[in-house]
Amino acid sequence: MSASEIESDLSADERAGLELIRETGGIHQSDFWKELDVSSRKGSRVAEALEESGLIQREDTVYDGHNTFYLEPAPRDLDFSLLMADDMLSPFIGEEEVDPQADAFSQWMMNLAYEEY
């Protein structure tokens, strides 16, 4: 099941929690439930559900003298295949402007045109 399919099955609270974790880049669980305006018990259940679905990672930590978890987004697998034509990386990567008359661009386009799927 893809991440987008998993995300479509989330409850409203889980979706809000995932968005909060992604926006902040990581948050302590003790702050997480407060930001979501839910009870600590519900916040814990939301975090556990997100972890079980593979969308976030939870790590034991101590924060303000209390044991808690640090919640952060799980790394996503990126699909770079759309940037490739045969074994050539798109000339658009790392360039502010690409000359459509340049050999590198022409070769990449030719590889893209002749690539078999």
Image (cartoon, rainbow, N blue to C red):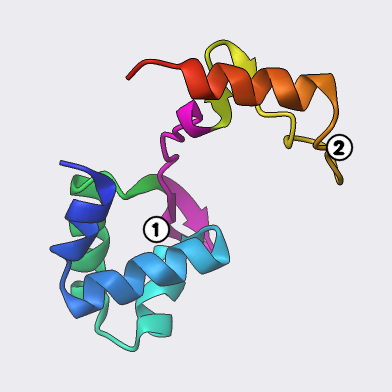
Q: Nearer the viewer, residue 82 or 75?
A: 82
Q: Which amino acid does label 2 sit on?
A: Asp
Observer-side mark, 1 or 2, equals 2
Callout 2: SS = loop
User: Where is residue 75 shown, x and y percent of the image?
Assistant: 45, 40
Identify the residue position indicated by label 1 in the image. Answer: 68
Q: Could you classify mark 1 by the number of other residues whose Cα lies within 10 Å: few (under 14), some (14-19), or many (20 or more)?
A: some
Crowding near the residue tagged with mark 2, few <14, some 14–19, many ≥20 C-alpha atoms within 10 Å? few
User: Could you tell me which residue is drawn at 34 percent across and 89 percent down?
Assistant: 37
Residue 78 image offset from top left, x and y in percent: 46, 35
Q: Which mark is residue 99?
A: 2
What is the number of callouts on the image? 2
Q: Can residue 77 be seen in this view?
A: yes
Residue 70 horizontal side relative to residue 17, left or right: right
Residue 20, compared with residue 25, is above or below; it is: below
Q: How far apart are marks 1 and 2 (CA)?
A: 53 Å
Identify which residue, 13 or 48, lies in the foreground.
13
Tell me where residue 45 sits by quadrant: bottom left
